[in-house]
Image (cartoon, rainbow, N blue to C red):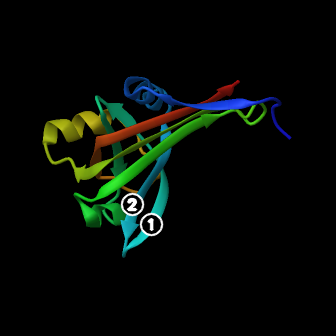
């Protein structure tokens, strides 16, 4: 199985949580569709205290522009079973400013081959991060 010994879970300061999130390129966005939770893997970038993703026109997330979402990313070592997780909760809004859209499109290459023509910014209202370390 995995690592050995006792582990401690401790909270990360907000700045450290956002730094770790900025240093990886993918995570999962959780939102509501017809009153039910939906989770999708996406790539992202961190801009200040916001998480930015791109979406295609048919994305369920776009139907709820202005809805509260959660964005989660983590990094765990399967052998040692040590690592961290960060969750950003906030309002997801479609970015309309052409200059911002152009800048984000240049910085954030989508994973899928279909047209990804919308930029969505999640304005962080709550940032929680935890780290699992050796005792």
Classify residue 97 by image quadrant.
top left
SS at circle 2: strand
The quadrant in which the N terminus is found is top right
SS at circle 1: strand
Q: Count of labels shown?
A: 2
**Res. 74 visible in picture:** yes
41 w.r.t. 7: above or below: below
The residue under the point 83% across, 30% down is 4
The residue under the point 66% across, 26% down is 133
Q: Which mark is residue 31?
A: 2
The quadrant in which the C terminus is found is top right
- Neighbour tally class for label 2: few under 14, some 14-19, many 20 plus, Cα within 10 Å: many
- Neighbour tally class for label 1: few under 14, some 14-19, many 20 plus, Cα within 10 Å: few
Q: Which mark is residue 128?
A: none
User: Residue 122, how many percent across, how many down?
Assistant: 30, 45
Between 117 and 68, the one nearer to me in the picture: 68
What residue occupies the far right of the structure in this picture?
1
**Left or right: where does residue 8 sit relative to residue 57?**
right
Q: Which mark is residue 37?
A: 1
**Left or right: where does residue 111 sit relative to residue 55?**
right
17 w.r.t. 66: above or below: above
Determine contact: label 2, label 1, CB under 8 Å. Answer: yes
User: Residue 25, how many percent across, how many down?
Assistant: 48, 35
User: Residue 120, how many percent across, how many down?
Assistant: 28, 48
């Amino acid at each position: 199985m995995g690592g050995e010994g006792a582990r401690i879970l401790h909270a990360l300061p907000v700045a450290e949580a956002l730094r770790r999130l900025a240093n990886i390129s993918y995570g999962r966005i959780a939102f509501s569709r017809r009153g039910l939770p939906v989770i999708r893997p996406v790539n992202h970038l961190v801009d200040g205290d916001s998480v930015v993703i791109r979406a295609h026109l048919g994305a369920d997330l776009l139907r709820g522009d202005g809805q509260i979402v959660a964005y989660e990313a983590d990094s765990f070592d399967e052998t040692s079973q040590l690592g961290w997780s960060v969750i950003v909760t906030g309002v997801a809004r479609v970015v309309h400013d052409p200059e911002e859209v152009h800048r984000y499109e240049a910085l954030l290459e989508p994973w899928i081959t279909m047209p990804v023509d919308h930029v969505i910014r999640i304005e962080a209202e709550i940032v929680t991060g935890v780290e699992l370390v050796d005792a």
